[in-house]
Structure formats: structure tokens, C-alpha cells
Image: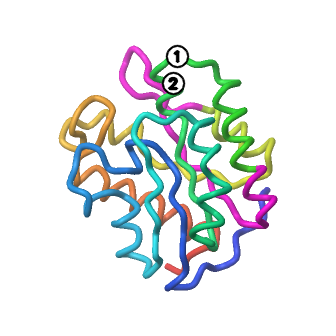
């Protein structure tokens, strides 16, 4: 398996790259999952979410963000807009591969967070992330987003969470990072 991550101490800068789900669409700014994660970890979590971005667009921004923020850890949650636009899985993987390349060039650990693929029954988990993570040798954390989006009490609209949903998403990310060794309990 993937080697566990080094512990990222409190006070470290962590970069959260994503789209509207990272930006926090559907809730107040202080309710976004990067803000909640920062409060629970003591990290300075930079919210680099831009609503509407595809995996390729988000990952194209990563080198400049790394240079600017100098983070100790990268959290990437992209692909949702690709899925909404019915882009092929290969397009998502190409975008994510660019993120992985940027992380490797900067010698930074990168963790992928899963994004569900919309299906006829609502949000469904997609194996794309696990498959890509294994192939690329990067750890994948299950964001639990599919289950949260299926729960009407946790979402603001069919594709965005509310404050309670983002709080749970942050808890899922935190638990995944504890399991990988980036955080103490």
C-alpha cells in the first residue's frame, strides 16, 4: 500500500484545492470544510476552491498556489464539474495527473478526496479515484460526499452541502488524514 504520510504539525499550511464544494457553496464562508478542518487541526488551511472548475482547470492553478502558499500538504477534491458535464473519466484522470505531477515537482504530499459521480439514483461513489490513486501512488480519502448528498438534511441543493454537511465532510477528511498518519487523533 501507500506509505503513511508524515505528521503535519499544528500551525502548518495546508492547501485545499477544489471547486464549489471546497469553496463552500450552499453555506456561509466560515462553514466551508477547509475552514472547519482548520479549526479542528490547528492548521492554516488555504481554501483554493473555485466554483465551476474542472479537474484540469483546478490542477492548472496548482503550481502558482504552491509557490504562493508553500504548503506542507495538498488536499485535492476535483472532478465534480467534469462529471456534471459528462466528461469522460480519462479527462478527470488527466487533470488529476497534472496535480500529482505538480506535487511531485514540489516534493509535497498530495491526498485525493473522493467526489461522487451523479447517477440516476443520486450521487454514487466512483471507483475512479481509488483506481487513479493506486496507479499514481497517492493516498485517497473517502470524503463521504455521496452519502451526504443523498441526505436532504445535509445538502443545500442537489450538488452542494449545507453547513451541517460540510461539517461532516471535514470530519471525514480529518478521520482519513488521521488514518494516513498526517494527524494525531
> Image quadrant for the N terminus?
bottom right
Q: Residues within 10 Å of mark 2 (few under 14, many from 20)?
A: many
Q: Is residue 11 above or below residue 92?
A: below
Quarter holding residue 111? bottom right
Q: How many marks?
A: 2
Q: Residue at x 67, y 59 (%)?
A: 110
Image coordinates of residue 59 in percent, x first then y, are 63, 44
Are the residues flagged by discs 2 and 1 in contact, CB closer than 8 Å?
Answer: yes
Image coordinates of residue 153 in percent, x first then y, are 18, 42
Is 112 in front, or is 172? 112
Is 69 in front, or is 162? 69
Q: Residues within 10 Å of mark 1 (few under 14, many from 20)?
A: few
Q: Secondary structure at mark 2?
A: helix
Q: Residue at x 51, y 58 (%)?
A: 16
Quarter holding residue 20? top left
**Structural distance between the alpha carbons of marks 2 and 1:** 5 Å
Colouring: rainbow
Q: The magenta stretch spans which residues?
A: 101-126
Reading the image, the residue beneath label 2 is: 83
Reading the image, the residue beneath label 1 is: 86
Image coordinates of residue 74 in percent, x first then y, are 61, 61
Image coordinates of residue 158 in percent, x first then y, are 28, 29
Q: Is residue 42 above or below residue 57?
A: below
Image side of residue 140 versus residue 29, left or right: right
Q: Secondary structure at mark 1?
A: loop
Q: Which disc number belongs to residue 165?
A: none
Q: Residue at x 42, y 34 (%)?
A: 52
Amino acid at each position: 500500500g501507500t506509505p503513511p504520510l508524515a505528521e503535519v504539525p499544528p500551525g502548518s499550511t495546508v492547501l485545499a484545492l477544489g471547486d464549489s464544494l471546497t469553496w463552500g457553496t450552499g453555506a456561509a464562508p466560515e462553514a466551508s470544510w477547509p475552514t472547519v478542518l482548520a479549526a479542528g487541526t490547528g492548521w492554516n488551511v488555504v481554501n483554493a476552491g473555485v466554483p465551476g472548475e474542472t479537474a484540469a482547470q483546478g490542477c492548472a492553478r496548482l503550481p502558482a498556489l504552491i509557490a504562493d502558499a508553500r504548503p506542507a500538504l495538498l488536499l485535492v477534491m476535483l472532478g465534480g464539474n467534469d462529471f456534471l458535464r459528462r466528461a469522460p473519466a480519462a479527462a478527470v484522470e488527466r487533470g488529476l495527473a497534472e496535480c500529482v505531477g505538480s506535487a511531485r515537482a514540489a516534493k509535497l504530499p498530495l491526498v485525493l478526496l473522493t467526489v461522487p459521480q451523479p447517477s440516476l439514483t443520486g450521487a454514487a461513489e466512483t471507483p475512479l479515484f481509488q483506481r487513479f490513486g493506486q496507479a499514481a501512488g497517492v493516498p485517497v480519502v473517502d470524503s463521504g460526499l455521496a452519502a451526504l448528498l443523498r441526505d436532504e438534511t445535509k445538502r443545500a441543493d442537489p450538488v452542494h452541502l449545507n453547513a451541517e454537511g460540510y461539517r461532516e465532510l471535514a470530519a471525514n477528511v480529518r478521520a482519513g488524514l488521521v488514518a494516513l498518519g498526517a494527524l494525531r487523533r
